[in-house]
Amino acid sequence: MGEAFDEAFPHYLLMGMTDKQFWDEDCALVVPYRKAYQLKQEEKNYTAWLNGLYIWKALQTAPIYVNGFMPKGASVEPYYEKPIEFAKPKKKENKLQEHERMKQNGIDFMNKLAGTFNRQFEKKQQEERLKKAKAGKEG
């Protein structure tokens, strides 16, 4: 049993528990430390996701897409005018639905972008074939 405590000790130190709390105080104290650590990890994960959201929004509004590579008829959404507010708690289902919607929007956008690149590439190849064909007839 001592090995299990020795194995767990570094993990609880990482969670912010002191060695005195771990070895000498109430053993039930590990529960709130573990829960607090899990909440911190969830917050880090959410922050990383939010950073990805901001980056994705920035890419959607980047001038390169507007000027040259946007499919015809596509519209560009403006970048956020202010930071996303967190004052109103959202239901978990709404966050999941929003995430899925944004994911699908990203997939749709990338598919349109890939289609545009493919059409440009095919057009360029066709022009090169015509040039070769004309050069062969003249030569």
Image (spheres, rainbow, N blue to C red):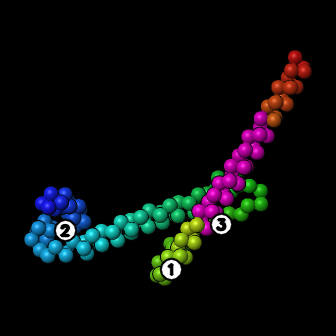
Indicate which label's residue lies in the foreground, 2 or 3.
Answer: 2
Q: Determine the residue positioned at 20% across, 61% down.
A: 8
Residue denoted by label 3: 77
Report whether 17 appears left or right of 85.
left
Between discs 1 and 2, the one toward the N terminus: 2
Disc tally is 3
Q: Secondary structure at mark 1?
A: loop
Return the x and y of residue 72 as percentages of the image width and height.
77, 56
One can see residue 67 in this view: no
Element type at marker 3? Answer: loop
Q: Are marks 1 and 3 in contact (CB under 8 Å)?
A: no
User: Residue 73: percent from the left, percent from the top?
Assistant: 77, 60
Q: Quadrant of the C terminus?
A: top right
Give me the C-alpha separation between circle 1 and circle 3: 25 Å
**SS for dot 2:** loop
Residue 114 seen in the figure? yes
Residue 62, quarter of picture: bottom right
Name the one closer to the observer, 2 or 110. 2
Taking 65 as reference, is 129 above or below it?
above
Residue occupying the far top of the picture: 139
Judge from the rendering whether residue 12 lies leftward or rightward of residue 78; answer left or right.
left
Dot placed on the residue nearer the N-terminal end, 1 or 3? 3
> Can you give x and y, in whole percent of width and height, for residue 116 in the image?
73, 49
State yes or no: residue 120 in magenta. yes
Q: Nearer the viewer, mark 1 or mark 3?
A: 1
Instruction: Magenta stretch: give its range.
Output: 101-125
Q: Determine which residue is flagged by label 1.
A: 91
Query: What is the x, y in percent for residue 136?
Result: 86, 20
Residue 10: numbered disc = none
The residue that disc 2 covers is: 17
For the residue marked with disc 1, what is the amino acid? Lys
Q: Residue at coordinates 65% horizontally, 66% vertically from top-left?
A: 77
